[in-house]
Image (tube, grey):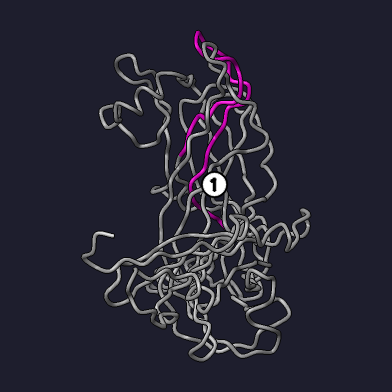
Amino acid sequence: MRFVGPLIVLVLAITVYYVINEPEPLDALDTATPPAAVPDTTATTAKVEKQSGDAGPFLRAGVKPNQLSKEDAKEIETDPVETGNCTLEIKFFDAEDFSPVSGQAQLWRLGSPGNDYWSNGDQLQVDALAKQGLLTIENLPAGKYRLHPLFARNGSPANPEFEVSGDFTQFDCAVEMPGKDDVGVKIYRPDKTLLFVTNEQVQTKRLGWRLSGRPVDPSWIKGRVEKSTGQESPPRISEKKGSGSKRPWSQQTVSDLGVRFGDLVEGNRQSMRIYRFQIRKGTQSSMRLNLPHSGRSTEYVALYIEPADLQASLIFPEGQEVQELSKNFIIESTALPLDVENGATLDTVLPQVEVEINFLAVGFDAVNFKWRPADGPLPKIPLKLIGSDG
């Protein structure tokens, strides 16, 4: 009997352990409320601090005063931002699936007070990179603000304004993210005839892509005006760079929308991708195509000049025998969107489409020029023998 007491204690201890650590049933896991997300300690914290000297407060997150160039210091000095005691935590999420999203974001203070040199108006307070969907900004003055996520889809609605006050403010920011489009390009000759008609077989090859920055100009900004000149303070632009890889040749049938290029990423408020392609029909009508896809339209217009027409424009040096050099031209067109919803037509767009011509032939200097139908007739192309003076 002397072992009964300790045995009862042991049984009770084991029972308590399994009650506390009993696995949750699968159906409970499916319906349980998920735990609150723990903030990522690597998320960006931007501080609006005062600089030493006369440069005033700076607004580039993570930049020390001594790291600023003279140009940046001078720029900041002209319209310094105010500091305060408020902290703002921003959570960025995809407006469609509510998942965390990240990228470069601007925080604008609305109706910021003027100073000796600048009128009151909206002022860029911070330009910083959100990570893991989070951005914390310290030392803000209380007031009205508006976020401008540069990684949002080009043309997406403006984000609402909100108040920052007290020691801590939290704001959830929905972002419409860029999607992917199936883009069609119709390629015309200068006389408006199509190079490739519906149901023709062509081959396309992606040569890569690069990012191109665009001015950020939110329509809602009420800019600050420099009192001495009357000029409005320009927005600060965060430059973004990048590039993409090549893909192999693929065969396709031309549709009613032209040559199709699927899965092209829309542009955002900060930059857009300029895709490069090569198109050919067998060994004929080979050309290169630049396609800057902003997301405004999925229909594009490009231009092609027949090599025979370029051959007819060649002017050979005096005494030089005329040669057949039509295969020595490299033709590259930059497609423009046919934005029908905003009134664009083929007659208004095609004259503005630019084609770049490169001519390379043995014994002659290389020739390069750009042309648009709006420039007038196709120019004559004088050739020059390598090493000659004229």
Residue 84's x, y, as percent?
A: 49, 20
> What residue occupies the far top of the structure in this picture?
116
Residue 323's x, y, as percent?
A: 38, 81
Q: Residues within 10 Å of mark 1 (few under 14, many from 20)?
A: many
Which residue corresponds to the image point at 55% horizontal and 72% vertical from the top-left?
A: 305
Task: Place residue 14 in its image quadrant.
Answer: bottom left
Q: Answer whether residue 101 is magenta in the image.
A: yes
Residue named by callout 1: 150
> What residue occupies the far left of the structure in this picture?
387
Highlighted magenta segment, given as a residue range: 99-127
Q: Is residue 138 above or below residue 44?
A: above
Kindly identify the amino acid type of the residue bearing the numbered disc 1. Leu
Which residue corresponds to the image point at 66% horizontal and 55% vertical from the top-left?
A: 95
Left or right for 5, reference 174: left
Q: Is residue 52 above or below residue 332?
A: above
Which residue corresponds to the image point at 57% horizontal and 53% vertical from the top-left?
A: 268
Indicate the secondary structure of the residue bearing disc 1.
Answer: loop
Residue 168's x, y, as percent?
A: 54, 30
Front in this rendered view, residue 120 or 300: 300
Q: How many marks?
A: 1
Residue 182 visible in the shown view: no
Q: Answer whether residue 173 is magenta in the image.
A: no
Task: Place residue 114 in its image quadrant.
Answer: top right
Residue 157 visible in the shown view: yes
Left or right for 2, reference 353: left
Residue 47's x, y, as percent?
A: 42, 31
Front in this rendered view, residue 213 or 319: 319
Quadrant of the snapshot with the C terminus: bottom left
Which residue corresponds to the image point at 61% horizontal and 54% vertical from the top-left?
A: 153
Task: Place residue 110 in its image quadrant.
Answer: top right
Left or right for 298, reference 271: right
Front in this rendered view, residue 36 or 261: 261
